[in-house]
Image: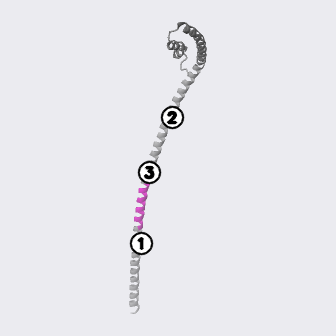
Amino acid sequence: MLKSSNINSVLNEMPDPLAKEHQAQPSSSNENSKAEALTCCISKDQDVMGSLAALQLSAGVLQIAEPPLDHVRVQLRELIGRQNKIYIDLSKEKYKLDCSEVAKLNDMMSDVRRYKDKLAKIKKEMQGIYQRTKDLKKRAANVAACKQRDYQRKLDRQQHEESLIGGH
C-alpha cells in the first residue's frame, strides 16, 4: 500500500531492475552481453514503462482519494475526541451519583440509628410508665382497702354507739 502521494518517493522506493542485472552479470563477453542487454533492456523498458504507468495511475487515484480521506480522518479524530470527552463527563457524573447514593445511604443509616435510639428510649419510658402505673394501681388498691376498713370501723363504731344509746 502506498503511503505517500509524492511520485518521486514512490519511485525511489521501487527497486531498479537494470541496476541489479548489471551487478549480477560479469563483463567478460561484451558482444554477447550487449545483445542480451539490449534485448533485456527493451523488455525491461517495457516493464518499467508499464510499472511507471501503473505508478502514475495509482498516484492519480491517490491524489483524487486522499483529500476526502484526510477530511474524514480529521472528522474521525474530532469525533473520537468528543466521544472521549463525553465518556469522561459521564464517568464523572456516574461517580457523583455513586457518591450521592453513598451519602444518601449513610444518611439513611444515621437516621436508622437515630430512630432506633428513639425507639429504645420510648420503649424504656413505656416500661417505666407501666411499672409506675402498676405500682400506683397497687397503692390505689391499698388505699381503697384502708378506706374500706376505716369506713367499716366507722360504721361499726356508729352501730356500737347507737346500740349503747338505744339500749339505755
- Contact (CB < 8 A) between labels 3 and 2? no
Residue 81 rendering spot, x and y as whole percentages? 51, 29
In the foreground, 51 or 114: 51
Q: Which residue is mark 1?
A: 137
- Quadrant location of the N terminus in the rendered image: top right
Task: Check disc 1 and report its element: helix, strand or loop.
Answer: helix
Classify residue 25 as left or right of residue 160.
right
- Quadrant location of the C terminus in the rendered image: bottom left
Give the crowd class for mark 3: few <14, some 14-19, many >=20 residues within 10 Å.
few
Task: Check disc 2 and report its element: helix, strand or loop.
Answer: helix
- What residue lies at 46% left-to-right and 48% top-to-bottom? 105
- What residue lies at 43% left-to-right and 56% top-to-bottom? 116
Give the crowd class for mark 1: few <14, some 14-19, many >=20 residues within 10 Å.
few
User: Which residue type does callout 3 highlight?
Assistant: Met
Foreground mark, 3 or 2, reads: 2
Q: Which residue is mark 2?
A: 87
- What residue lies at 50% left-to-right and 32% top-to-bottom? 84
Magenta portion: prevailing SS class? helix
C-alpha span from label 1 to label 3:
41 Å
User: Which residue type does callout 2 highlight?
Assistant: Tyr
Task: Check disc 3 and report its element: helix, strand or loop.
Answer: helix
